[in-house]
Amino acid sequence: MKKTLLGSLLVAALLLASCDQKSSTASAAAPASGTPNGEVNVYNWSSYLPDDVKADFTKETGIKLNYEEYDSNETMLAKVTAGGNYDVVFPSQDFVPTMINKGLLTPLDLAKIPNLANVDKTIIDFTQSFDPGNKYSVPYNIGATAVVYWKDKIKDPVESFSLFGDPKYKGKIVLLNDMREVYGAALHNLGFSANTTDAAQLDKATNLILKWKANILKFETDQIPTLFAKKEVWAAFVYPENVLTAIDEKDKDNVGFFFPKEAGIKYQDNMVILKGVKNLDNAYKFIDFILRPDILARIDDAFGYPGISAKANALRKVAPFYSTDKLSKHEFRQPLGDKADLYNKPWQEKVLIGQ
Amino acid sequence: MKKNYGTWYTLPLAVWISLFFVIPIAIVLIYSVLTRDYTGGVIWKFSLDSFSALANSSFIRATATTVFIALVSTAITIVLALPVAYYMARSRSNTILLLLVVVPFWVNFLIRVYAWMAVLGQEGFLNDLIRWMGLTNEPVTFLFNIWAVIIVHVYAYLPYAILPLFTTIEKFDFGLLEAARDLGASHVKSLTKIMLPNVQSGIITAVLFTFIPILGSYAIPDLIGGTDSTMLGTIVALNLRTGNNWPLASAISVVLTIITSVGLLLYFLYNQRLEKVHLQFQEETK
């Protein structure tokens, strides 16, 4: 009897090796040869820098690029705090102050990043709210969630978040599985700030989200482009370029998108240099290389981003889906600090686990 | 006298188990009673906040949903696995059959889950089938609900149930079945009264091998589930990431560990009792 259990355990142990693994993506880029000028360790979001740009960086500068990817700010922060060996990382705007406060960042010498001058003034103005004077960070990319929809299924939609609760589209809407984005939408729909810490306002927002929840297909992270392309959903609350770049050419005219009139949340990702890095000069060279107009144009073309530089946009081969002045009404998410549970608790206990 | 090297032989395993099993569980236990750091991680100050946060109707509901999914999936898995294992044990080509059971493991787990999405999706095989049969013209949504989650769990853990059942049934003396038939038992009765009690240990092992991993499942409910099937694994992941509440995530893991440990404990107690009965029986028949 015991033998059976042990034997089976052994078999299972062998089999388990092939089991249950999500996320965790790492990739090494850049060839080993032709790198006389040392290296630079970059830790960036997944699918956020085209491979040919990585290769060209090494070719032009002779610096070896060690490249690793993450899928959330939290993962990045956890690894950086645990002493990961990185020079340049790409935190979103609400993580820049957190990283400054934790003493994780090197104050930047902007004279070493001359290409920062190519970035639009509107974008630089945006950054002042979380890093005045760009003391620690320079912008990389900006964007916001929008509603993408099939025109033949949803005719002349009201350009508002209230679409999510419309019973005509029951089970045909998917919302990004992101607490702050969904709360931002609900709070703006009710006319409140997306960074509110007022319990009564958040209560109302939670109730609105519960109404939406009863009407939507699901909260989803990775599969929205697939679900949308297959028409399993008619509308998606998502970063629009993720879906728009995945649509077949023949369907392009049938797909529309809008920023709800109430606005919502925008994000900005930034490049920072960590404290005490070994490759400081190469880190500056990498950042400056990325901000060169022709390089920015290639990055934005590859992913369909609105772009942070008019100079770069002039060089693009593909027209951006929207321009950044559409985002002036949007709010940046601010770090909530010890008020985080005002959002976390209702999101987990009422929305996810639910009635 | 020969020297006893037993301690030395077990040393590598002891080191391995303590490094990768005992210490991690200890860390989870310790983290569950520390104070959370709002930017991730923990502050080294004792606190029972996360356990008091768990004593709340939502988490109890999530635990109930999780246990329900695990129980139903396990029950279906065992019912499907028993006849397969029985057939394999009786078949002459059981090596090939065994291989066939293991073949799915050659394909990555996630890819197989995505394959199920292709089967159950609105443009999927199942929808094509019912449309072809003329049952409906509108695509039906099979995915993103609790039953889809259960179906995919059954699929994913079926081999883990078949293998222990097969090894037990293979050792079963099939002559006993013939004896039962000779003594007038029906075919069904001989299976339920003679075989099932004799392969009980295999069934329990199969239950443990399916129930315990499903209890901690994360990827399947995340991909296949909808708004009605949030399992504890999802809540753990959420609190480790955007929720930034590591103590709460640890406390939920502790609860899951306790549920599984109680199950294992019951199994071992039952096992001991069974062995005692067995010994007694042997004494009496001597």
Image (cartoon, coloured by chain):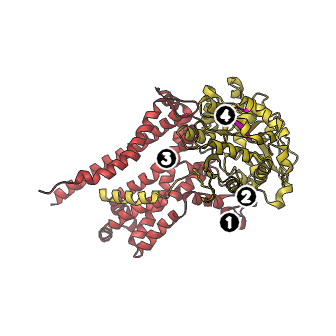
Point out which mark residue A96 bears: 4
Eye-nearest disc, 1 or 4:
4
Which quadrant of the figure contains the N terminus of chain B? bottom left
Report in which chain the residue with disc 2 lies. Answer: B
Q: Which residue is labeled 2 in the image?
A: B139
Q: Which region shows up in magenta?
A: A134-139
Q: Nearer the viewer, residue A95 or B278?
A: A95
Q: Which badge, 2 or 3, is on the more N-terminal residue? A: 2
| Badge 3 and badge 1 in a common chain | yes
For mark 3, does the 10 Å Cα neighbourhood hold few (<14), some (14 to 19), or many (20 or more) residues? many
In the rendered image, which quarter is residue A182 located in?
Answer: top right
Q: Which residue is labeled 3 in the image?
A: B215
The secondary element bearing badge 2 is classed as loop
Does residue A310 appear in this view? Answer: yes
B72 displayed left or right of B131? left
A232 displayed left or right of A159? left
Point out which mark residue B129 bears: 1
Q: Which chain is red?
A: B
Q: CA distance from mark 2 to mark 4?
A: 46 Å
Report in which chain the residue with disc 3 lies. Answer: B
Hey, which residue is sitting farthest front in the picture? Answer: A36
Q: CA distance from mark 3 to mark 1?
A: 32 Å
Looking at the rendered structure, the kind of residue marked 3 is: Leu
Point out which mark residue B57 bears: none
The secondary element bearing badge 3 is classed as helix
Looking at the rendered structure, the kind of residue marked 1 is: Leu
